[in-house]
Amino acid sequence: MMLMTVKGKIAELDAAAMTAARERWDQLTKPLGALGKLEEIGVKLSGIQGTVYPSVARRAVVVMCGDHGVAAEGVSAYPADVTGLMMQNFLKQKAAINVLAAQAGAEVLIVDVGSRVEEKWDGVLHRKVKAGTDNMAQGPAMTRDEVLQAIQVGVEVADDLKARGVEVVALGEMGIGNTTPSAAMASVLIGYPVAALTGYGTGITVEEKPRKIAVIEKAIEVNRPDPADPLDVLAKVGGLEIAGLVGVILGAAANKMAVVVDGVIAGAAALAACRIESNAGCYLFASHLSQEPAHAVMLQEIGLSPLLTLDMRLGEGTGAVLAMPLLEAATRLVAEMATFADLGL
């Protein structure tokens, strides 16, 4: 599906299914609302899937990988080569996302949408638009066409997951330097000052942080992205893996699949996706609250409340898969708990 087609397929949630689900939750053997956010999760899943008894049995995490030209400005504590090394680590099943996804029963799908890696490793979905973005401190990170290509990659990934029966998808990513475009996007799209949104990323020092802030401010000044045009923002100060995740969100929403948002990079993708099509936000769950300061601002802007607060800032989709058992809990409760009528009341 192309972008305009996808947007046209993203519907509001099924109101009738949500009403019926609330009635079911209210009949269960508990005080009204006593299961709190689990009830909200369950009702939202019912709205997404159009049934009182939704399922999240089939799960996947999409790890979009891309490199960033702005890494040359010294905004990360790690060199750009680490992106490729971590992709190999994913393939060896030795990264944090592999461990946590296995625990959550989620398939890990690695997508190379824009890394500088030249090799084509078995186990990686090779959909490279270009070998890393250009340095956004000196000019646009991408062309608008490259953004659309990366979004299309994500849409096609979501379509494939739906075809294979996946019911919920977590957003993951890998790309050294990618907290920099994420903060830049948040600043432009929300209108917050860069300094208030910029964190330590991979672990830069307090002394190095002002440089990162200055680089982001320079990128915005040089490129002048249009806050009213999310595609322009993505092209000028975004990332290929961020655009890829935008496509996953839009494609999943068009296919009536739940999407679990990870940290600040996935948050930037979610913010852009919601600006492209507001109904996309109905399909999102915020998994956790990242230590990166832009994340809380993004979630508030989208209207999402994080389910977990674990002081994490790893990325890869780690927080998102940790939240998947909470979605499963909601589906089990509504299906397996007794009602007061079952007790003869």
Image (cartoon, helix red, strand yellow):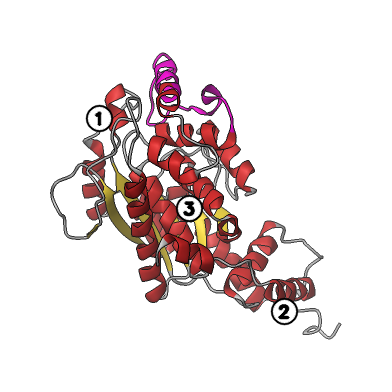
Residue 293 relative to residue 155: left or right? right
Magenta residues, as a range? 191-217
Q: Is residue 97 visible?
A: yes
Q: Are marks 1 and 3 in contact (CB under 8 Å)?
A: no
Residue 71 relative to residue 35: left or right? left
Q: Position of residue 307 (x, y in %)?
A: 60, 50
Residue 10 relative to residue 96: left or right? right
Q: Position of residue 211 (x, y in %)?
A: 40, 17
Mark before the other along the chain sequence, 3 or 2 = 3
Q: Position of residue 55 (x, y in %)?
A: 54, 74
Quarter of the figure with residue 313: top left
Residue 273 relative to residue 100: left or right? right
Relative depth, front residue between 108 and 264? 264
Please give the residue where the numbered disc 2 appears in the rendered image.
338
Mark nearest the camera among 1 and 3 is 1
Q: Amino acid at mark 1?
A: Pro
- Residue 320's tag is 3
**Height in image: 103 above or below 294?**
below
Q: Is residue 214 magenta?
A: yes
**Height in image: 106 above or below 15?**
above
Please give the residue where the numbered disc 1 appears in the rendered image.
79
Give the alpha-carbon distance from disc 3 to disc 2, as whole Å.
30 Å
Secondary structure under tag 1 reads loop
Q: Position of residue 10 (x, y in %)?
A: 54, 65
Q: Amino acid at mark 3?
A: Ala
Give the alpha-carbon distance from disc 1 to disc 3, as whole Å.
26 Å
Relative depth, front residue between 225 and 122? 225
Residue occupying the point 52% across, 39% down:
290
